[in-house]
Image (cartoon, rainbow, N blue to C red):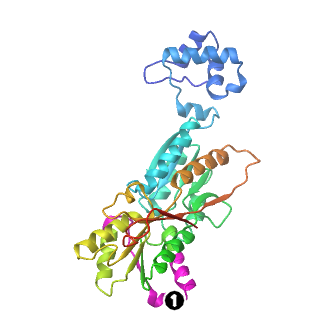
Amino acid sequence: MARTQNGTGVRIQDVAARAGVSVGTVSHTINHPELVSARTRRAVERAIKDLGFVPNQQARVLTGAASQVIGLVVLDVVSPFFMEAARAVERAAREAGHVVILCNSDNDPDRESQLLQILGAQRVRGALLTPARTGQGGDRARIEAGHLPVVFLDYQTAGDDCSVSVDDVAGARLAVEHLLELGHERVAFVGGGQGLRQHVQRAQGARDAILAAGLDPSTALVEITQDGLGIQDGVLAAEHLLEGELPTGIFCGNDMMAFGVYRRLSRAGVKVPDDVALVGYDDIDFAADWVVPLTSVRQPTDQLGYLAAQLLFEHSAGDEAHVHRQTVLQPELIVRSSSTRGGRTGVTIVG
């Protein structure tokens, strides 16, 4: 039996003495409460509270109890989108009596692999993962995670993994269709994170909308891809656009890049939306409060994070009835003044 002790020096033996039970009964109460009578459990729980005893999580795992810790590995912890998703994950974890370790892969496959190995060594219950750039991200991550249960977040897998994602092709199609309906015949798509599946799919959605309108993507669509996903990447993309004939409509793969595009266009004297209509993606909290309120494709971020966490708890429980599944959520277009030249705003278009 492990001699569990917390930071204040209170031992599991002290709890047993206070409750008038054996050390084994205290261990069962902490790790397998279903094996202990309600009366005994209440006595042990009261002793734990009175003494301020905190069970050692590693010792609990070694006894066979499920860990109360899950990992969350995202591409960029600075991203407002991932922060909103993380809040939803934490809410689901808190309701389940768990805590979350937030990790940043910085969109680096090697760093991602290292983080998965560390989480596995810490014997967390499982991990939520947005894979770094790679064509086989899901397969690689699943193999490297090994025994660690993984649910993919904001990433639709092609295999039989568990995942919760958003239909990015449909979201991008909504954005570009909106620009075409406004009369723009030449549109730019600004993407980020070289090889990042979400932005690859958004580029595909932009092309689909152009083709559906009977236009030639080689002339009606300008595609620019940056390494990163932030404001500065949007600034750099806008500089490229300004070097040639500027499209009258620009769709960015996320809102942060759209802010960067706006910043650079503004410095060049280009007005949004009078000269150029601008659309972002994610509809983060302050998109509506930008200098010119930003039209954006809204992802159901809260639902995305919450459902992914619940799926991970189900997947990691080891229940034979569990079936791996892929949940795909639908985005919606929120129309604001960055694309409408003073026309309709606050319009919701669901894909």
Query: Residue 110 at what x, y percent from top left?
Result: 46, 61
Which residue is identified by label 1?
215
Residue 26 position by quadrant: top right
* Residue at image location 37% in from the left, 83% down from the top: 247
Q: Is residue 261 above or below residue 42?
A: below
Q: How many marks?
A: 1
| Left or right of 61 on screen, residue 323 | right
In this rendered view, identify the residue nearer to me: 303 or 50: 303
Magenta residues (range): 203-232
| Left or right of 41 on screen, residue 103 | left
Q: Answer yes or no: is residue 201 visible.
A: no
Q: Answer yes or no: is residue 178 visible.
A: yes
Of all residues, the one furthest to the front in this rendering is: 343
Q: Is residue 100 above or below residue 298?
A: above
* Residue at image location 52% in from the left, 83% down from the top: 210
Q: Amino acid at mark 1?
A: Leu
Q: Secondary structure at mark 1?
A: loop
Query: Residue 165 at what x, y percent from top left?
Result: 58, 60
Residue 332 falls within the magenta-colored stretch: no
Residue 221 falls within the magenta-colored stretch: yes
In this rendered view, identify the residue nearer to me: 324 or 121: 324
Q: Is residue 13 above or below residue 109?
A: above
